[in-house]
Amino acid sequence: MQPTELLNTVLPKLSKITGLPKNFPNNWKLCGLNIKSEPCETPEAVQDKIEAFAPKQGWLCFQSEVAYFCQQDFCKNHSIPSHAIILYGEVVNDQSSLHIREDGQGCWILTELTETQGDEYLVEEKRFLGEGKKLTPDELYYRIYWQYDEQYGYRQCAARFTEFRQEQNANKK
């Protein structure tokens, strides 16, 4: 079953079943997705790629801490410490998300995900709660992409970080 058939025919029928969320399936959309991966061999190369990506928001996990940033021009205003090695992270600019992951063999894989017009994927937005600690984001938003597989049906094939949001009534911190 192709994404358009699922979105326009099957999901509206399912939404009438008791117990499904009221916005189901309204939070599902059709789209395309460009995915480009490239290896990086040194921590300096990873930092250079992140700076060239010009992130507006994101998080970077180092050996001893997780750094969150929510302002534009982070890389111009803050340098990644030379002694700190990025283990993994996710950053976002106006058009794309960049995943940073160690490959387990002393290198990193940087994967850029850009949503496009199209109908190859079903996409939904998901909200995740932050750690609830001081100086951490309240909410993290991701776009989750589902693709049809002849053998298994719809399977999640990608997820990309899109933004942080803070609670409006932040009494908890």
Image (cartoon, helix red, strand yellow):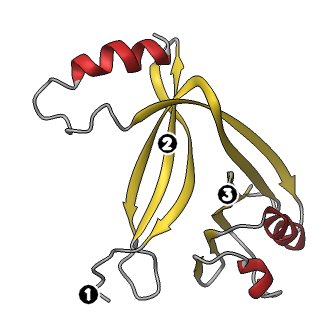
Residue 171: assigned label: 1
Decide if residue 121 is on the left or right side of residue 52: left
**Mark 2 highlights which residue?**
144
Secondary structure beneath dot 1 equals: loop
Query: Dividing the image into 4 quarters, which one contains the C terminus?
Result: bottom left
Q: Estimate the spatial distance between the alpha carbons at disc 2 and disc 1, rounded to whole Å.
A: 30 Å
* Rendered location of residue 55, percent (x, y): 71, 67
Q: Amino acid at mark 2?
A: Ile
Q: Nearer the viewer, mark 3 or mark 2?
A: 3
Residue 79 visible, this orientation: no
Q: Residues within 10 Å of mark 2 (few under 14, many from 20)?
A: some
Q: CA distance from mark 3 to mark 1?
A: 30 Å
Residue drawn at (62%, 25%) of the image: 118
SS class, disc 3: loop
Instruction: Give the vertical position of 20 relative to 4 (above or below).
Output: below
Q: Position of residue 74 (x, y in %)?
A: 71, 79
Extreme residue in the left direction: 18
Quarter of the image for residue 85 reads bottom right
- SS at mark 2 in the image: strand
Q: Earlier in the sequence, mark 3 or mark 2?
A: 3
Residue, x 47% and y 16% (percent of image)? Answer: 4
Query: To which residue does mark 3 refer?
Result: 94
